[in-house]
Image: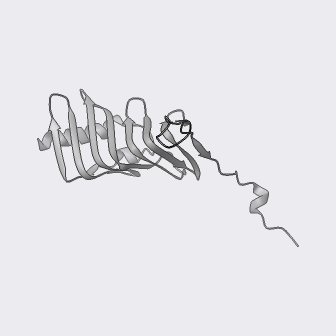
């Protein structure tokens, strides 16, 4: 059983090829209160105050499910109130942070999908809605609103806050 858990962690490392290159060369550490492996499905379930770290990558959740297809990590699903994700995507970038009721990391597609009161922040820019899809390869973010909730009028809308770009002249001291 321990060998299989170690194999799954190695698969997580080997299948990832985005974000900081150094991240994927770091060991994966998963802390939880309980873990269970299903050898037939290749799924490992971690429950209770789960934290996964690898370099700048950090996922915090009440439950973390790892799915593999043969020898490759297919998907990691984090659930929580909320589940949290953070990572430095490229050298020199600020930390990208996200939270929601569910976060799916799709290893093959190099994509993060945040659902349920989804929020993503990158370089001070903020995206919120019911569903946010972040494609790390294309460096694109899409957001969707949700259905009408009881007691509210209309469909839930998305919210985007974009910070102004700093200009060179704004950073210079005026001469008197």
Asked if residue 61 is positioned above or below residue 132 in the image, the reply reads below
Residue 112: give x, y in percent of width and height.
Answer: 43, 38
Image quadrant holding the C terminus, namely bottom right
Residue 49: give x, y in percent of width and height.
Answer: 27, 54
Q: Please tell me which residue is depicted at 49% across the width and 43% down the height of the picture.
A: 151
Label count reads 0
Q: Please tell me which residue is depicted at 27% across the width and 33% down the height of the picture.
A: 67
Image quadrant holding the N terminus, namely top left
**Residue most extreme to the front:** 151
Q: Is residue 135 visible?
A: no
Front one among 111 and 120? 120
Q: Is residue 46 visible?
A: yes
Residue 89: give x, y in percent of width and height.
Answer: 48, 45
- In the rendered structure, the answer to whether residue 53 lies left or right of residue 164 reads left
**Residue most extreme to the left:** 1
- In the rendered structure, the answer to whether residue 172 lies left or right of residue 5 reads right
Front one among 9 and 62? 62
- In the rendered structure, the answer to whether residue 60 lies left or right of residue 161 reads left
Asked if residue 133 is positioned above or below residue 51 in the image, the reply reads above
Q: Quadrant of residue 5?
A: top left
Front one among 71 and 39? 39
- In the rendered structure, the answer to whether residue 9 lies left or right of residue 132 reads left
Give the colouring mode of the picture: one colour
Front one among 71 and 35? 35
Q: Please tell me which residue is depicted at 16% across the width and 38% down the height of the picture.
A: 37
**Residue most extreme to the right:** 176
Residue 46: give x, y in percent of width and height.
Answer: 23, 45
């Amino acid at each position: 059983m321990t060998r299989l858990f170690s194999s799954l962690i190695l698969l997580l490392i080997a299948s990832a090829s985005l974000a900081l290159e150094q991240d994927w060369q770091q060991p994966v550490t998963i802390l939880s209160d309980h873990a269970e492996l299903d050898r037939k499905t290749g799924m490992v379930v971690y429950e209770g105050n789960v934290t996964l770290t690898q370099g700048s990558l950090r996922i915090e959740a009440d439950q973390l499910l790892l799915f593999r297809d043969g020898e490759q990590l297919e998907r990691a699903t984090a659930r929580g109130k909320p589940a949290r994700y953070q990572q430095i995507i490229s050298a020199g970038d600020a930390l990208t942070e996200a939270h929601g009721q569910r976060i799916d990391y799709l290893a093959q597609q190099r994509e993060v999908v945040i659902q349920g009161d989804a929020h993503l922040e990158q370089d001070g820019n903020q995206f919120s809605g019911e569903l946010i899809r972040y494609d790390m390869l294309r460096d694109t973010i899409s957001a969707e609103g949700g259905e009408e909730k009881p007691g509210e009028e209309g469909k839930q809308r998305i919210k985007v806050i974009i910070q102004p770009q700093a200009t060179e002249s704004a950073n210079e001291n005026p001469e008197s």
